[in-house]
Every structure is written in structure tokens, then in C-alpha cells.
Image: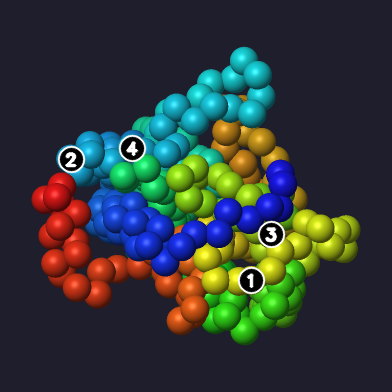
Amino acid sequence: MSTALNLKSPREIKMMRPAGLAVWHGLQIAKELAVAGNTTGQIDAAVKQFYEKIGGEPLFLNYPNSTPGKPAFSGVTCTSVNEQVVHGIPGDYVLKEGDVISIDTGCRIHNWCGDSAFTLPIGKIDPQVEKLLEVTKQTLQIAIDLMPQKERWSEVAAEMETFVRDAGFTTVENFVGHGIGKNMHEAPQVPNYRSKNLRAKDDFLLEPGIVIAVEPMVNLGTKRVIAEADHWTMSTADSKPSAHFEHTLALTEDGVRILTEPPADPNELETLLSGK
């Protein structure tokens, strides 16, 4: 992927907010349903219904598989449970006490995209897994805090990786974040670690107008992942739990704007829900 950046104007960043807000609200719907006894398919159906109601285009539904001849993605959410790292297909899995579920979703509104994810505990979970979730969430916050302070993304990524390592966990390197705008996946690639093989031309400056989806994925054990038989779901090689948090972030002259954060003004959400 080219690292040529498609910087957004303040007006374009403002235009991206409805999609980000829609994704935030979709995840709140998912959160309400992420309880023991419900299926991942029920969660997906509810988020799909919401996107249909507001006229949003789900970004994941029918997304093509990178392997020729394999099925397109069948959900509007990725629902990855326990050792599943990412791209879990929603279906008839019944959530139970002690599970963790990573829910990732994206939506396009008025030709602009939003993308976000979080990992939720189902009831009481193992303390070490609880720590895994908190560390992953904090790793995303490190990126938010440091983006206005650092010159290049690699400096931020190095801090993220160090934080994860010091906590006793591992950063998944098979998947990275991405630029986002009118397309879900744009340049640049946004790793959550500082690769020893990173070439200068693949790094990028942190300058106003850059909009990226930052999404650390952190494992309790090995960082290695394996593909499941459904051709989509990626799981940890040692079957230990994984966590995933993501926000769509815009770097502006005034700092970082989280486009997938909750509404500060209730009228903002009311406008979205009314379809105006």
C-alpha cells in the first residue's frame, strides 16, 4: 500500500463525524446485547437493523475475501470470541459467563466512513484477562495522547508496543490499522508496533488532516495467529484470549478528534437518528 497521505480538510473531518457517530451508536446496541445467553448473530442483526434505519452502508457486509474463491464476509460486525483475534463471523455461538467478545464494525454515511471496535467481558472474567482488556484499551489511549506530540507514527507505535510488552502481553503484528476516509481502507498502513524492517518511506508524518483507524490487538500469550476453517476468523496460535480496541482518529490543529466517540451534544445523536 502506498504511504501517500490523503489529508482531510477541517470541513471534510466534520463531514466524517456522522459515520463515526453511527458506528459508536451501533457498538452501544451491540454492548446491550453482549450478555450470556445471546448469540453473536443476534448482536449482528441488531446493528444491521440500526444501519438500515439511518440509511447507513455497512462496510463489512459482503467484503471480499482476499483468497480467490472464498466467501465474502457475511456480517455487518466482526464478533471475535475469546481466542479469536479478529474477523469472527457472527452466527449461532451462544455467549456464556467468562467469555470476552471483540466487536468491530464500520459504516458509511454521506460517502464518508467510520470504523471502531472494543472488547467486552461477559459477566465475571479471569483477572488476567481483565488486565488484558484494560492494557489494550490503554494502548489505544497512548496513541490518542501521543499523536499531537510526536513527529512520526513510528514513534507512537514504539510507545504502544513497549507498553504492551511491559505489561506482559504481546502485540499482534499480522494486522494493522489504516487510513480512512471515503474508503474504509486508505493509505497509510498504521502498525501498532515498531517494525525492525520499517523503511523510512513506509513511515508517515503526523500532521493536521491525517485521519486513521488505530486498532491495537493484544494477546495474552503468543503474538502468532492462525486462520480458522471459515476462511475469515483469525485466532491465537496458543488458544489464549485476545483483545481489540479501535477508534477513527483525526489529527487537527487543535489536537486529536475522536470521530467514533460518544456525542457531546444530545442533539448530535438525535439528528443522526432522525436521518436529517
The quarter holding residue 40 reads top left
Along the line of sight, the residue nearer the viewer: 101 or 188: 188
Q: Is mark 2 on a helix, strand or loop?
A: helix
Do residues under tags 4 and 3 come within 8 Å of each other at their CB atoms?
A: no
Q: How is the image coloured?
A: rainbow
Along the line of sight, the residue nearer the viewer: 257 or 135: 257
Q: Mark 2 points at which residue?
A: 53
The amino acid beneath tag 2 is Lys
Q: Mark 1 points at which residue?
A: 206
Along the line of sight, the residue nearer the viewer: 211 or 214: 211
**Residue 32 located left or right of residue 158:** left
Do residues under tags 1 and 4 come within 8 Å of each other at their CB atoms?
A: no
As drawn, the label of residue 191 is 3
Asked if residue 234 is positioned above or below residue 20 in the image, the reply reads above
The amino acid beneath tag 4 is Glu
Q: Mark 4 points at which residue?
A: 57
Asked if residue 82 is positioned above or below residue 143 in the image, the reply reads above
Quadrant location, the N terminus: top right
Q: How far apart are marks 4 and 3 (CA)?
A: 27 Å
Closest to the camera, between mark 4 and mark 3, is 4
